[in-house]
Image (cartoon, helix red, strand yellow):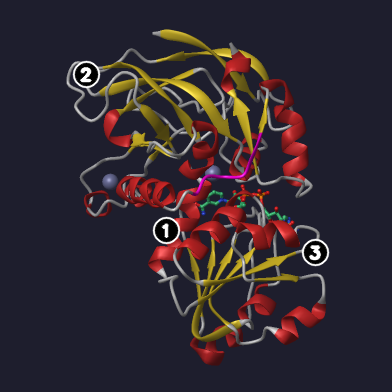
Amino acid sequence: MLTVNAYAATSATAPLGPTTIERRDLGPRDVLIEIKFAGICHSDIHNARNEWGGATYPIVPGHEIAGIVSRVGAEVTRHAVGDRVGVGCLVDSCRECVNCRKGEEQHCLKGFIGTYGGVGRDGKPTQGGYSTHIVVAEDFVLKIPEGISLDAAAPLLCAGITTYAPLRHWGAGPGRKVAVVGLGGLGHMAVKIAHAMGAEVTVLSQSLSKKEDGLRLGADHYHATKDPETFQKLAGTFDLIVNTVSAKIDLDAYLSLLALDGTLVNVGAPAEPLSLQVFSLIMTRRSFAGSLIGGIQQTQEMLDFCAKHGLGSDIEVIPATKINEAYERVLASDVRYRFVIDIATLK
Ligand code: NAP
Ligand code: ZN
Ligand code: ZN
């Protein structure tokens, strides 16, 4: 067992603070990773504050992990000491069910093992990336290509794959009009990736305050959703809308922006239920869908795609002592566009 430094929340209302946790002994197919950077995903906040229910404490969040392999088990073949690697939201799954065999481990019928907040195969709670080291089964460790720095790569492990997967699934590409709702961690990656796929990209943000950034990131158009005229001007426009908003939105208003056969896919995961009028779907045969991160193979595909197109996340690197402040800034939509913890500050 390895005792390592970490940052944890001890209750839904407590700020995160320093602690130590145990990492399991390296099994034959396990990899020990020295974590260099960990992104702060809005899901970390939902979880640390138990907004989705079911949280157990202490909880060490962090599922956007980038680091270096420091030891490998005797039977490991995919990774070697010194490799640049990443870990996202999954650290294991049953590997046998129909969905796992399709490479959709995030939809494992027995439930995937989450990087934190889950129960590992050793029966102990899993703990995430706000820590100096992690032990992960080699099949769930991704290779970070040369050309993406580790700090800018970390957020790809969740924000990157969560937006890449629906953009691929619903065919973002040349001739397709894609709107991204919310320009935060997920949203800014959706803009970069959809643009690199060749789609015509529109940002729908609460205000125009980040318009210059949005256009620089790759958007062709940028509109403020607090301006009611936006919804009139853009009615019936988009083939695909990716909603990344962490709070409740007026679904009917956004569905009205879809073209014939268009899809609004929700990746944002607010705790409160969303409601819609059936007529918002009946009219022009629209669909409302959801999407959950992505499988391991597609996560590697996304990392390789990002390297090929020179895409990393736009980040603000912070010491661990600033995690609680960063949480408040994320909640205030004051993030440009992902906070990344410099794990060296945890040592
Ligand atoms: P984030 O960085 O906080 O970005 C969310 C953005 O939504 C904000 O920057 C803001 O953009 C907009 N927004 C926030 N509150 C709003 C409100 N009340 N009304 C309208 N717009 C609002 O969060 P994130 O890390 O990108 O995560 C976004 C959501 O996705 C979270 O709920 C997270 O749990 C979820 N998530 C889901 C998956 C999945 O697999 N489905 C994976 C990761 C995360 P503007 O300032 O531009 O309006
Ligand atoms: Zn996440
Ligand atoms: Zn499975």
Q: Callout 1 environment at 10 Å: few (<14), some (14 to 19), or many (20+)? A: many
What span is in magenta?
Answer: 311-316
Query: Quick one: label 2 or label 1, which is nearer the N terminus?
Result: 2
Q: Is residue 315 magenta?
A: yes
Q: Quadrant of residue 242?
A: bottom right
Q: Is residue 178 above or below residue 34?
A: below
Q: Quadrant of residue 25?
A: top left
- At label 1, the amino acid type is Ala
Q: Secondary structure at mark 2?
A: loop
Q: Secondary structure at mark 1?
A: helix
To which residue does mark 1 refer? 165
Query: Quick one: label 3 or label 1, which is nearer the N terminus?
Result: 1
Q: Is residue 4 visible?
A: yes
Image region (quadrant) for ligand 2: top right
Q: Is residue 36 magenta?
A: no
Query: Quick one: label 2 or label 3, which is nearer the N terminus?
Result: 2
- At label 2, the amino acid type is Pro
Task: Note whether ligand 1 is within 8 Å of mark 1.
Answer: no
Q: Residue at x 82, y 75 (%)?
A: 227
To which residue does mark 2 refer? 28
Query: Mark 2–mark 1 contact, CB under 8 Å?
Result: no
| Residue 94: percent from left, percent from top | 27, 40
Q: Residue at x 48, y 22 (%)?
A: 35
| Residue 240: percent from left, percent from top | 52, 74
Of helix, strand and loop, which mostly describes the magenta segment? loop
Q: Callout 3 environment at 10 Å: few (<14), some (14 to 19), or many (20+)? A: some
- At label 3, the amino acid type is Ser
To which residue does mark 3 refer? 207
Q: Is residue 279 above or below residue 215?
A: below
Task: Note whether ligand 1 is within 8 Å of mark 3.
Answer: yes
